[in-house]
Amino acid sequence: MIRVVIDTNIVISALLRAGSLPEAVINLAFSGDVQWVASEAILAEYAEVLQRPRFAIGSARTADVMSRIRKSVLLVAPTIRIEATKDPEDNMFLECAQAGDADYIVTGNIRHFPRIWQKNSGRDATRIH
């Protein structure tokens, strides 16, 4: 099964744009057609960003979405620190991808990530999409 780490901007876009590609990605993960991989740090970021007033998502919807996400993800605990992104806060997504042996990182912010990042697992590189 394909394993993906989903960047926060995809989660937000999925909630704000019905019928969008980000929503399709999230729906694939919720359905179990792909395995969504996340760490506690990523889940904390999702929750924090979902609560930002500028998105007007609301606390009830945020709680519902976070509950669905927690039920869907394969939770991993990264143990290796990685410093490969242009934005240091985005390194947690690479760390999670390595810990969860993810095939892809799905993001709308490709300028901060290396296009291909070689994991040390003996498998192919993780592609950033």
Image (cartoon, rainbow, N blue to C red):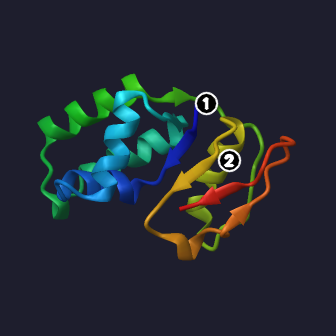
Q: Residue at x 43, y 42 (%)?
A: 44
Tell which of 102 and 40 is nearer to you: 102
Residue 36's disc number? none
Of mark 1 and mark 2, the one earlier in the sequence is 1
Tell me where residue 113 appears, x and y as whole percent: 61, 68
Q: Is residue 49 visible to the viewer in this orientation of the structure?
A: no
Question: Is any atom of residue 77 visible in this view?
Answer: yes
Horizontal arrangement in the rendering, residue 113 relative to residue 74 (left or right): right
Q: Quadrant of residue 13?
A: bottom left
Specify whether 111 is left or right of 47.
right
Residue 12 falls in which quadrant of the image?
bottom left
Check the image and name the residue furthest to the top: 71
Q: Residue drawn 63% across and 74% down?
A: 86
Image position of 61 (left or right of 126):
left
**Label 1 close to label 2 by CB (< 8 Å):** no
Q: Which mark is residue 76?
A: 1
Position of residue 22 measured from the top left corner of the image (x, y, whole percent): 33, 55
Give the alpha-carbon distance from disc 1 to disc 2, as whole Å: 10 Å
> Does 32 appear above or below 3?
above
The mark tally for this picture is 2
The kind of residue tagged 2 is Glu
Which residue, given by chain and number where applicable, does mark 2 sit on? 95
Q: Between 1 and 88, which is closer to the camera in this rendering? A: 1
Residue 57: x percent and y percent? 15, 50
What residue lies at 42% left-to-right and 27% top-to-bottom? 32
